[in-house]
Image (spheres, rainbow, N blue to C red):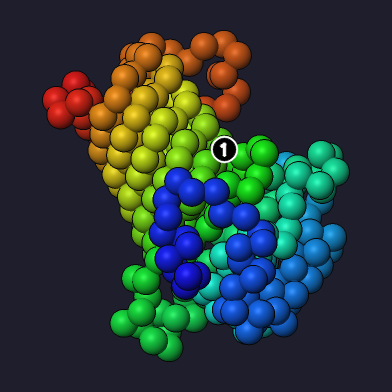
């Protein structure tokens, strides 16, 4: 079975043995080791967990992109590295689920920018991420995604597509809260369910949830389209609850479009 055939089986559990016995895996072991070492070096030298500000996150993400551009790896190596790094073995104080998502997004973005410059006709070919091997979900995947199309086999956690500019993120499973938070463009497709605050502070782009969403749908939304095929617990039409006030800059759903089960509801 080819690697691409393994990946495209949307809901089948893909385990590490399947990848490591595939001939394509053995061809690029050196590339995979380079990516694992890159993650280790980036995490140790350029991530300061005590600084949890958006500015620090942005700087760390872009530094990872620049580091990734200095090494050579293939698109398939990004898929394989999902089985080589276990973010949940990183001490909780370092927030491995968050760091690993940033790292994956950065190596995808770096590879995409290289492809766009050198072989532009291949820039729209999708990248594949696998999360079915994890017992927990990784957060903040697709941070500032700008161009790549990414297919995710499995579930993702909170804050997917945060500040996304363009491209596509297609999740074959579920996502957590804050899907599409602050996105300005591009498309997010979730094939199953998502949590609360879907489309929160969405300023553009398109989100399509095939399944259900939870509370505060569309909170702070100012533009774009949020389409939900399943159930909605409720659409945000009131001020933020007190416990969430410090997270958000907008107080309620303002503009944009929400389509629920084929009907425009906002």
> Quarter-wise, where is residue 189 in the image?
top left
Q: Residue at x 39, y 35 (%)?
A: 192
Residue neighbourhood size for the residue with mark 1, other residues' Cα within 10 Å, grouped as few (<14), some (14–19), many (≥20)? many
Q: Residue at x 44, y 30 (%)?
A: 194
Residue 232, relative to residue 78: is it above or below?
above
Picture coordinates of residue 241 (x, y %)? 52, 11
User: In front here: 147 or 77?
Assistant: 77
Looking at the rendered structure, the number of numbered marks drawn on it comes to 1
Picture coordinates of residue 86 (x, y %)? 74, 52
User: In front here: 94 or 77?
Assistant: 77
Residue 200 seen in render: no
> Quarter-wise, where is residue 122 in the image?
bottom left
User: In front here: 200 or 261?
Assistant: 261
Q: Is residue 222 left or right of residue 127?
A: left
For mark 1, give the secondary structure: loop
Q: Residue at x 52, y 32 (%)?
A: 176
Picture coordinates of residue 109 (x, y %)? 52, 67
Picture coordinates of residue 103 (x, y %)? 65, 59
Q: Is residue 49 left or right of residue 11?
A: right
Residue 240, relative to residue 170: is it above or below?
above
Residue identified by numbered label 1: 157
């Amino acid at each position: 079975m080819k690697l691409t055939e393994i990946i495209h089986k949307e809901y089948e559990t893909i385990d590490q043995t399947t990848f490591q016995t595939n001939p394509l895996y053995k061809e690029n072991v050196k590339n995979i080791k380079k990516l694992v070492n890159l993650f280790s070096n980036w995490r140790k030298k350029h991530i300061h967990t005590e600084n949890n500000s958006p500015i620090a996150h942005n700087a760390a993400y872009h530094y990872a992109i620049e580091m990734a551009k200095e090494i050579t790896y293939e698109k398939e190596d990004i898929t394989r590295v999902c089985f080589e790094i276990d973010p949940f073995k990183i001490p909780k104080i370092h927030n491995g689920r968050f760091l690993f998502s940033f790292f994956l997004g950065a190596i995808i973005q770096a590879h995409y920018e290289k492809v766009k410059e050198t072989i532009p006709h291949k820039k729209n070919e999708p990248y594949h991420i696998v999360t079915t091997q994890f017992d927990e979900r990784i957060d903040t995947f697709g941070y500032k995604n700008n161009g790549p199309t990414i297919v995710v086999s499995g579930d993702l956690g909170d804050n997917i597509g945060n500040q996304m500019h363009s491209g596509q993120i297609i999740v074959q499973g579920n996502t957590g809260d804050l899907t599409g938070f602050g996105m300005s463009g591009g498309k997010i497709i979730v094939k199953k369910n998502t949590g609360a605050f879907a489309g929160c502070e969405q300023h553009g782009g398109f989100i399509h949830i095939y399944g259900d969403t939870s509370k505060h749908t569309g909170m702070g939304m100012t533009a774009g389209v949020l389409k939900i095929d399943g159930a909605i617990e409720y659409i945000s039409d009131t001020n933020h609850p007190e416990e969430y006030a410090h997270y958000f800059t907008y107080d309620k759903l303002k503009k944009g479009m929400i389509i629920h089960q084929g009907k425009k509801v906002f």
